[in-house]
Amino acid sequence: MVKVKIVLIVFIVLGLSFTLFQVFIKDSPKMISQQDAEQIATKLYGGKVLNTTVDAEKDNYQISLENDQGIYDLYVNGQTEKVSNVRLVEKKEIALTVDEAKKNIENELNGRVQEIKQMDKEGRPFVEAIVEKNQKYYQVEYDLNEKKIIANHEVKEQVETPVISKQEAKEIALKQYKGEVTKISTVETATGTHYKVTIDGQKADANVYVQGHTGVVSSISVNSKQDDDEDEADDDNDDEDADENENEDDKDDEDDDD
């Protein structure tokens, strides 16, 4: 009788163990691999995985990844494959272009950018610009990452040694205005040394101003030859009137002698 009881107890224990195995172990879904979890994260957010840690108690993978927007932390459930707790840890700075910076500078200062160039300062992208406002010139530094002006001061006139030669200035000017170069001189402005190239064209004369250190044409002034011809014609008429008056005076003198 005792043996029968023992056998029954053993069968009961085995049955319960099998039942528990079926409920809690066999039916429990298997966790996905770390590689699969990382693929789920990059498929949703792009970029590359920086680091992955496993939280076995919660069946979660904690993944840190970097994409164009910045660095993110998120969780991927190892059983359900659901993504949760997405958090932007570090936002990536997107620098402005030179053209965008130029527009911002002109809008903020209510002036006109004469020159602009990009440079790096302590590993950060900047632009340096010369801005004309109310007939004065200002040197401006603009942070392309922070999208703001960080330095602004008035530029005093100073003499610079031109980088562009007279011959180069001549060639640059002739590309802007066709004709024969009659004179090249240098002038100093708030933005530095300029070449003033005088060109005799078919219908008009022009003065082309070429920046001596950049080769950029800053301005062109044109004088119509028709206006010059009218001025010369007026001068000729004045001369003819003067001659006629002189002849009449001579004739009056002859009559007086008679």
Image (spheres, grey):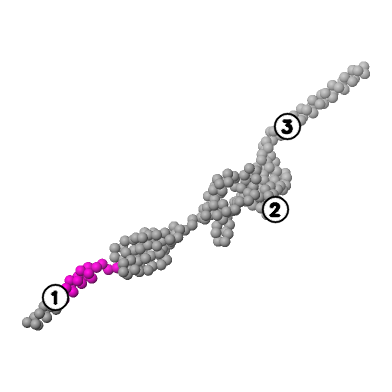
View extreme (left): residue: 1
Q: Which mark is residue 160?
A: 2
Kind of residue at disc 1: Ile
Foreground: disc 2 or disc 3: 2
Q: Residue 225, image x and y in percent?
A: 69, 35
Task: Tell me which segment is drawn in magenta.
Answer: 12-32
Q: Is residue 77 left or right of residue 198?
A: left
Q: CA distance from mark 1 to mark 2?
A: 102 Å
Q: Which mark is residue 3?
A: none
Q: CA distance from mark 3 to mark 1?
A: 126 Å
Q: Which mark is residue 231?
A: 3
User: Across the whole image, how many numbered discs are drawn on residues?
Assistant: 3
Image quadrant occupied by the N terminus? bottom left
Kind of residue at disc 3: Asp
On the image, which quarter does residue 118 sit in? bottom right
Foreground: disc 3 or disc 1: 1
Q: Which mark is residue 12?
A: 1
Q: Is residue 14 magenta?
A: yes
